[in-house]
């Protein structure tokens, strides 16, 4: 039942991907209760898009390379909550729908 699955995912607070090494793109969209994303193995070149996750506070990547990061409508996410390893190999960055200033160190 798609509606039941949608409701179950809508309440998801923590997403941990043990192995995303075979993925080239990962989109996480419309999970208002999600507070954290952890990708333990992101592979060689992952494009990560995160949108409409109102309670998201942190994104962490253990190993692998994020080459493209797109963040939109995640007002609780502070860049301090994004592991610095994400920015190491970044070739593209898109940030949208933020009303507060975003600071980069």
Image: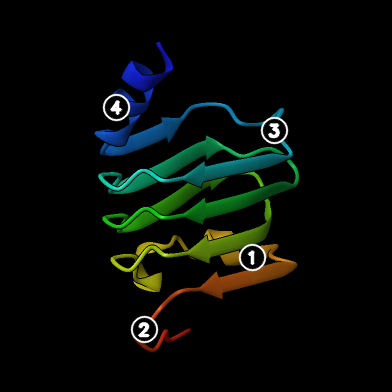
Residue that numbered label 3 is attached to: 23
Residue that numbered label 2 is attached to: 99
Badge nearest the viewer, 3 or 2? 2
Q: Estimate the x, y position of residue 92 in percent, counting from the top left.
A: 72, 68
Q: Estimate the x, y position of residue 16 in percent, counting from the top left.
A: 40, 33
Mark 1: few, some, or many residues within 10 Å (few <14, many ≥20)? few
Q: Answer with the quarter of the image where residue 73 lies.
A: bottom left
Residue drawn at 50 percent across, 36 percent down:
40
Badge nearest the viewer, 2 or 4? 4
Residue that numbered label 1 is attached to: 88
Q: Is 12 above or below relative to 25? A: above
Gap between marks 4 and 3 measured at Cα: 25 Å
Q: Is 72 above or below relative to 46? A: below
Gap between marks 3 and 2 measured at Cα: 32 Å
Q: Are marks 1 and 3 in contact (CB under 8 Å)?
A: no
Local SS, label 3:
loop
N-terminal label among 3 and 2: 3
Side (left or right) of 54 relative to 79: left
Badge nearest the viewer, 1 or 3? 3
Q: Are marks 1 and 2 in contact (CB under 8 Å)?
A: no
Residue drawn at 30 percent across, 57 percent down:
54
Gap between marks 2 and 4 measured at Cα: 28 Å
């Amino acid at each position: 039942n798609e509606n039941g699955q949608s409701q179950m995912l809508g309440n998801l607070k923590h997403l941990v991907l043990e192995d995303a090494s075979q993925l080239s793109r990962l989109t996480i969209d419309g999970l208002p209760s999600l507070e954290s994303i952890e990708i333990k193995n992101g592979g060689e070149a992952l494009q990560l898009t995160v949108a409409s996750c109102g309670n998201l506070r942190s994104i962490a990547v253990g190993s692998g390379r994020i080459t493209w990061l797109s963040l939109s409508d995640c007002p609780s996410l502070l860049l301090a909550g994004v592991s610095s390893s994400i920015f190491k190999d970044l070739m593209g960055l898109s940030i949208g729908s933020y009303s507060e200033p975003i600071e980069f160190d």
